[in-house]
Amino acid sequence: MNALTTQLDEAGNLKHFLTIEGLERSLLIDILDRAEGFLGVAQQAVKKVPLCRGKVIANLFFENSTRTRTTFELAAKRLSADVLNLNISTSATAKGETLLDTLRNLEAMHVDMFVVRHATSGAAHFIAQHAAPHVSVVNAGDGRHSHPTQAMLDMFTIRRHKGDFSALRVAIVGDILHSRVARSQILALNTLGAAEVRVIGPRTLIPADAAEALGVRVFHDLREGVRDVDVVIMLRLQRERMSSALLPSEHEYFQLFGLTEERLATAHAEAIVMHPGPINRGVEMDSQVADGKRSVILEQVSNGIAVRMAVMSMCIGTQNLQAQQAGEQRDAH
Amino acid sequence: MNALTTQLDEAGNLKHFLTIEGLERSLLIDILDRAEGFLGVAQQAVKKVPLCRGKVIANLFFENSTRTRTTFELAAKRLSADVLNLNISTSATAKGETLLDTLRNLEAMHVDMFVVRHATSGAAHFIAQHAAPHVSVVNAGDGRHSHPTQAMLDMFTIRRHKGDFSALRVAIVGDILHSRVARSQILALNTLGAAEVRVIGPRTLIPADAAEALGVRVFHDLREGVRDVDVVIMLRLQRERMSSALLPSEHEYFQLFGLTEERLATAHAEAIVMHPGPINRGVEMDSQVADGKRSVILEQVSNGIAVRMAVMSMCIGTQNLQAQQAGEQRDAH
Amino acid sequence: MNALTTQLDEAGNLKHFLTIEGLERSLLIDILDRAEGFLGVAQQAVKKVPLCRGKVIANLFFENSTRTRTTFELAAKRLSADVLNLNISTSATAKGETLLDTLRNLEAMHVDMFVVRHATSGAAHFIAQHAAPHVSVVNAGDGRHSHPTQAMLDMFTIRRHKGDFSALRVAIVGDILHSRVARSQILALNTLGAAEVRVIGPRTLIPADAAEALGVRVFHDLREGVRDVDVVIMLRLQRERMSSALLPSEHEYFQLFGLTEERLATAHAEAIVMHPGPINRGVEMDSQVADGKRSVILEQVSNGIAVRMAVMSMCIGTQNLQAQQAGEQRDAH
């Protein structure tokens, strides 16, 4: 089963959101447009819309991430859904239950959506392929593979600042090799028709075939790489890489690939700086950049809730449509 | 104070739900009938009824059980109640507070219901006996004693498949000696008038006086025990029994008491297979049975939410009645 | 920045609630009056008012306290707010994120209020000083400094039993030196015009300059100290003090400063006994007093929810006013 089949129903509606791969430009634009409509909800006195009232959304976090879980929880609550937080590693599996038995049980409890975070690439796909027809799956990050809601909130943030993608040069800086965020961003930028996507990092952290395989230009020099770009996306450096001989010390990394105002001098005068958070200050960038006028890092966080509301309500909407059609078919017989 | 007095108010309404013992057939039927009405809530677009809106239900889990806690939490949310999850072992008692002080404090916060899970037999009764008049207690499993909502969801599942209980032969297989689930099931089956209740297991795991004390037929051979039965209920094997010399290895247990299609050959052609979950596949049964056409294991999970909604709303209804009567008495003076 | 500036907006409305220090008598009375109005909510069939519907209140507990967190959570839910429980020590800071970055992120998620518990004195002030304009901060206890909602629920309880403060003698017994509760109570009692505030305890646990610095009368003898008082407030003894040579054994402490009916003989005949909980029975007081007719300890718990509803809804009300005024200013341009 390919990714496309898994994510869309027969009419092309979004049923699961697992990866950017295989999704058409029009669908990505649809997500961005809907998220635009949800941005205002956060400004209302009552920050709620009733789109998912009575639905149950279960956060299945096999890998701990308070920040990502919190944004999904807030997005679900703003859609008026009920939220179940399940820390899987400490519950069912401790009793020796298999993952599929856990899923079957949650489905039997009429959970409507699983938001899945897992350290293994492909985990969200696996769950979507085995989930009951009435359940949607949203990938909140799987191994090195994909983090599609992060990529979409980044696209949303870029579009709000830069408008059309077709003229944009975007640079992604850091550990491209291990980053699910970078993979999803590159796919999204290319699908949305960005003029040029660049990756910048040490040779040890960029795949050897990146240029052809990912459709990007590769740079190993930061100053060179950010020349004339409109957007600089910094990746979070996973500190566990430090000890694995792939990376020099944090200090040395900052000397080569840490973003400073001075090193941004060659970028477009209006270039924005992004980071998925949490920032390692003094490693990926200095505080002057992180807190400076180019930084849109906190906007990314706000936008993340609107984008997640869009994705979740689209998936639940597809379910409602299927249930309605099934009802009509029954009535016709 | 006997169990009956503790559970019912003076008019015979359910105030607490602690044990099947002492409850009349008509009350059990009432629970099953109400649960039938709640089954449909899970099929609604908005899976909510407002019966317990503004009520606070506290899950007091002294023993960890994500699965049971989750079904109670979902049942409470479908009744529109607010839910407090309190992991007692890591909170108040760590500060040296006594159990009764913890209860008094929660009562003072106007919590309406305690859902209690505890490793000690009698814990839920103790709490009900000491609870304030405005609080209901539901037993979510206490030691080896009782697990009445599990038994009622099993009865509910049996009735949906088999209708009337009076013609039914039901076999319960496994560690009868230590099982609160089995004790509650046997009481419920006998109260509901099942034709025959059998228990099947090794001599070390069936009480010596089971036949008289529990009102069951005892078998030590699986094939013999399931002959002509309509329902086979497998118990979960607690792995900690393995090391206690009461049980041989898991492999050896499966050879003697593990359910397979072949060993089910002597059962009624339409016999159903049940398990409270989570299943130890290859220990209590093989996957062919667990996932086969006789298995109603996942229906049990779905039914569990409806049955818990029934029990919780009945107890809260009794409270509302008491509050109303107290109000009328005040007004009359 | 002084405490007053931090807590009030320009019009003198409560924006944050960090300390009793600097607040005027009229504001404290306003809190007590509003709490009076919220007491009845707990008696309603539906224990809810819609004052904070759609608002998000985040419990930021850097120091574990299930009891305090639960009362804030219930208060928030009775105001119809959504609640986020964040155990900060195990989440963001584990990833090396700074406290300010965590705050900025939660603000970007449009959280409306932080309820802060922290082991360091001044933590809630620090957070309020750095919080975005749309966020309120409520101090749920910071180091040895302040626990203002506890003090206000104590004042509320005293007023319900004793009416006017101006004739009252109040004694606070125990470890005054390390107690944020005592500091806040003394400030509140003096602001509300209590006739006399006494502190009673061993010399090692009362600041040497207590009389002048705090405006209290100091006693080292319990019988002497409670003579003719209307209210006796017992502090919780932190057991970690035992090993620090500041205190004799628990048994010896009880012999000198433990409250018994007999030692209460010199107090006013109608004197009430209070304790913030959880009680160490047989250390601060015996069970006869804790459960006796003078004890209002469980009323304090109930009142705590009403008082927290008052404080939270006042802060959110100030925010709503600011947002409205900002909107009107925009419209005028």
Image (cartoon, coloured by chain):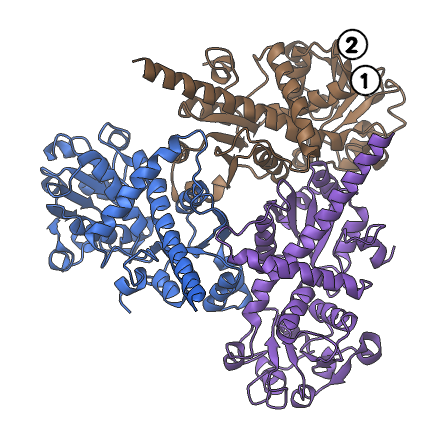
Chain colours: A purple, B brown, C blue
Residue B94 locus on image (x, y percent): 43, 44
Q: Secondary structure at mark 2?
A: loop
Contact (CB < 8 A) between labels 1 and 2?
yes
Q: Is residue A259 above or below residue C231?
A: below
Q: Is residue A30 above or below residue B155?
A: below
**Of A71 and A247, which appears nearest the observer?**
A71
| Residue type indicated by callout 2 | Ala
Residue at 50% over, 25% down: B316
- Indicate the quadrant containing the C terminus of chain B: top left, top right, bottom left or bottom right: top left
| Residue type indicated by callout 1 | Asp
- Indicate the quadrant containing the N terminus of chain B: top left, top right, bottom left or bottom right: top left
For marks 1 and 2, give the CA distance.
9 Å
Residue B230, numbered circle = 1
**Residue C175 makes an appearance in the image:** no
Residue at 44% over, 61% down: C327
Is C99 on the left-hand or right-hand side of C302? right
Mark 1 crowd level (few <14, some 14–19, many ≥20, 10 Å Cα): many
Residue C282 locus on image (x, y percent): 28, 36
Residue B167, numbered circle = 2
